[in-house]
Amino acid sequence: MKVYIEPIGRLINEFSKLPGVGAKTAQRFAYKVVNMSKDEAKNFADAIINVKENVHYCSICGNFSEGDVCDVCTSRPSDMICVVKEPKDVIAIEKLNEFKGVYHVLHGTISPLDGIGPNDINIKGLLERIAKGGVSEVIMATNPDVEGEATAMYISNLLKPLGIKVTRLAHGIPIGTDLEYADEVSLARAFVDRKTL
Amino acid sequence: MKVYIEPIGRLINEFSKLPGVGAKTAQRFAYKVVNMSKDEAKNFADAIINVKENVHYCSICGNFSEGDVCDVCTSRPSDMICVVKEPKDVIAIEKLNEFKGVYHVLHGTISPLDGIGPNDINIKGLLERIAKGGVSEVIMATNPDVEGEATAMYISNLLKPLGIKVTRLAHGIPIGTDLEYADEVSLARAFVDRKTL
């Protein structure tokens, strides 16, 4: 005898495809939907369909966009370009309300082990934007892992001969962390990148 | 400047209505949907709509059902009725593959503080089923909390004059737990409900 009736089993299966969602959590989510009103469930389903239909990538920077060009590219000066791996990195930086330039989303990082080379990510688009002129600084904001560092180094080597200033986000001890509890790699990096006071 | 574009913001909002899902998790779920293929997203949305359209409650026991009467009610002897609070309790018990009788879902428990009295839950339906005859035992499987105990007691008092055997699920120390680590209430209950060997 099957435990779930088909529609509930099917929904549990769909929910369990979400990241970090196991069988128990998927079951809780499905119950929640069963107990929603018809309108609530419809809004939920519509939001899923809507996101697939109306989220595109900006033709300039590769960020999420509703139209052909994203809000950031249309409204900001483009002399500083912040290079990130994924659109969600743009959102993380935008939440700071600190950076006032534009972005360039690579949609990946160079990773020879996974067979991802420089031509598989959007480096070409970045070079084209820079070739148009007016760019004074490129900030490499790829993740501080092996692939992110390698990608930052690769792009930096491409851009330096063009006379573009290339910078990298600082690494070190997170603010609010006691030295005692900082991870070793960050602490070592904080020594290497120490600043003159 | 808004951080999320509208379709993504809307989907994050929908996901954060799910139990235990905060802003960060909802954001991860939304990114996952953005990266799904159109078909995958459609299947997901369809499963949500489908569950609202095709999940009904069994007219006999009140359990989730695709048709008018659920699979359990159509295929099993109805001399033992297990009374539970919610349809998901049926699923929890069905997973054991232990109980071979039928269920009765109350859709709530008596809770004076919340203004829920005996007439607000499906006790009437249970009495009607018993009035039809052929029921030898009613197992009260409501939760071991104040409301669940009160409901079990109330229904038991209603049924005993009718000559129906009413039982309650055993409480005590969970299997696999050392005495030292058992919670005090369960341990006290284990003393009260001790069995002769």
Image (cartoon, coloured by chain):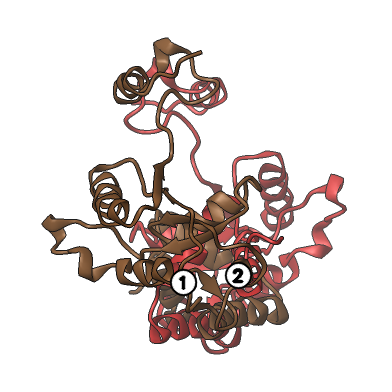
Chain colours: A red, B brown
Image height of A98 relative to B41, above or below: above
Identify whether A168 is placed above or below B120: above
The residue where tag 2 is placed is: A11
Disc 2 versus disc 1: distance between alpha carbons? 9 Å
Quarter of the figure that contains the C terminus of chain A: top left
- Note whether residue B2 is visible: yes
Instruction: Determine the residue positioned at 64% across, 77% down.
Output: B41
Q: Is residue B117 left or right of residue B129?
A: left
The amino acid at mark 1 is Val
> Within the image, what quadrant is residue A15 found in?
bottom right
Q: Chain of mark 1?
A: A
Kindly state the secondary structure of the residue where label 2 is placed.
Answer: helix
Q: Secondary structure at mark 1?
A: helix
Quadrant assignment for the N terminus of chain A: bottom right
Residue density around tag 2, few if under 14, some if 14–19, many if 20 or more, within 10 Å = many
The tag earlier along the polypeptide, 2 or 1, is 2
Residue shown at the point (33%, 61%) measured from the top left? A97
Q: Is the residue A90 above or below the residue A194 in the image?
A: below
Q: Nearer the viewer, residue B144 or A107?
A: B144
Q: Position of residue B6 (x, y in %)?
A: 42, 81
Q: Which residue is mark 1?
A: A33
Please give the chain letter of the residue carrying mark 2: A
Q: Amino acid at mark 2?
A: Leu
**Residue A21 appears anywhere in the view:** no
Residue B24 place in picture, x, y as percent:
43, 55
Q: Return the mark for residue A58.
A: none
Q: Are marks 2 and 1 in contact (CB under 8 Å)?
A: yes
Question: Which of the two residues, A6 or B87, is positioned nearer the viewer here?
Answer: B87
